[in-house]
Image (tube, rainbow, N blue to C red):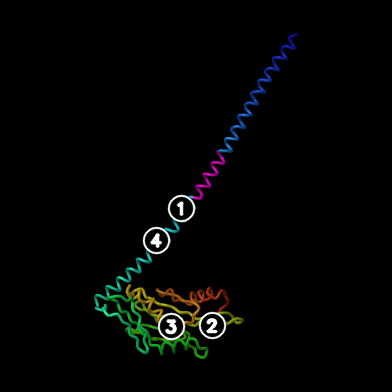
Amino acid sequence: MDDFTIGMEDKFKVLQERISKVHDSQDNVLLKFDTLAKNFDNLKKVVSQFSDKVSGLEEVATDRRKLKSEIKILKNRINELYAIVKEGKEDGSISSEVGDTQSNNESNHSGFSSSSKVTMTTGLDRDTIRSAYEDVRSDATPTEWAVFKFEGARIICSARGSDFTEFRTQFSDDDRAFGYLRLQMGDEMSKRKKFMFVTWVGPNVSVINRAKMSTDKAIIKDIISNFAVELQLESQAEIDIDQFKDALNRAGGANYGTGIRDL
């Protein structure tokens, strides 16, 4: 065997060894890729579980905020009720006799009834309130609004008119009141009248009288029952004709131009 043949055999052996090492390295790389793929799958599962937990935490946070808000509302109601009871004790209006009285022109509402109760009676001047209500609704009169205020323990019609500027002057910081308005909506192609009921609670009104407003409002709404929008107002800035019309447009589901008969 000559030197050339021996040299070729040696080189062939070296080449075989290197090819074998390459195969081993390839197997090792494939093994690592398999391990990496498994780890990636595990990572995807962990991320998915984490995402589910985050979503759960968000739902819990939302529930907690909702619960906190409901607790706050309940606490305010309890404070208002306590203030009413306290006022009743101080002015002697708590009676151990349970009973309701009702005259021809008054609706009487009691705060609650038990072995002792707080009597909170609000009456209505039904004739004047109904007359003003029908006046605002009538197309035959120029009346666009009416305001109802408390006169002692009764609600009366305190004013009515057609000028919105005058309407705004009817509500002071110390007042509790209700308002009923007619506004002409639409354009020349689609004119229509809309009615609005507003509740006014001035910023200086006591907690006790604020608490009574929901009951008193239910009483007057026995007569004033037809309106598209109801608003509660607590500042002069809220008595705004444009805001009123926006509320009526949203309630009506359409937004046309302003008609001829405008406040």
Foreground mark, 3 or 2, reads: 3
Helix, strand or loop for disc 3: loop
The boundaries of the magenta stretch are: 39-52
Q: Residue at x 26, y 78 (%)?
A: 96
Label placed on residue 57: 1
Residues at circles 2 and 4 in contact by the CB criterion of under 8 Å: no
Q: How far apart are labels 1 and 2 at the CA level? A: 49 Å
The foreground one among 81 and 147 is 81
- Residue 227: x, y in percent? 49, 80
- Residue 187: x, y in percent? 59, 80
> Circle 3 sits on which residue?
222
Helix, strand or loop for disc 4: helix
- Which kind of residue does numbered mark 3 sit on? Asp
- Residue 95: x, y in percent? 26, 79
Foreground mark, 1 or 2, reads: 1
Q: Is residue 167 magenta?
A: no
> Circle 4 sits on which residue?
68
Q: Residue at x 33, y 72 (%)?
A: 207
In this rendering, is residue 141 above or below 110? below
Residues at circles 1 and 2 in contact by the CB criterion of under 8 Å: no
> Circle 2 sits on which residue?
193
Quadrant location of the N terminus? top right
- Which kind of residue does numbered mark 1 sit on? Leu
Label placed on residue 213: none
Helix, strand or loop for disc 2: strand
In this rendering, is residue 206 above or below 15? below
Helix, strand or loop for disc 1: helix
- Which kind of residue does numbered mark 2 sit on? Lys
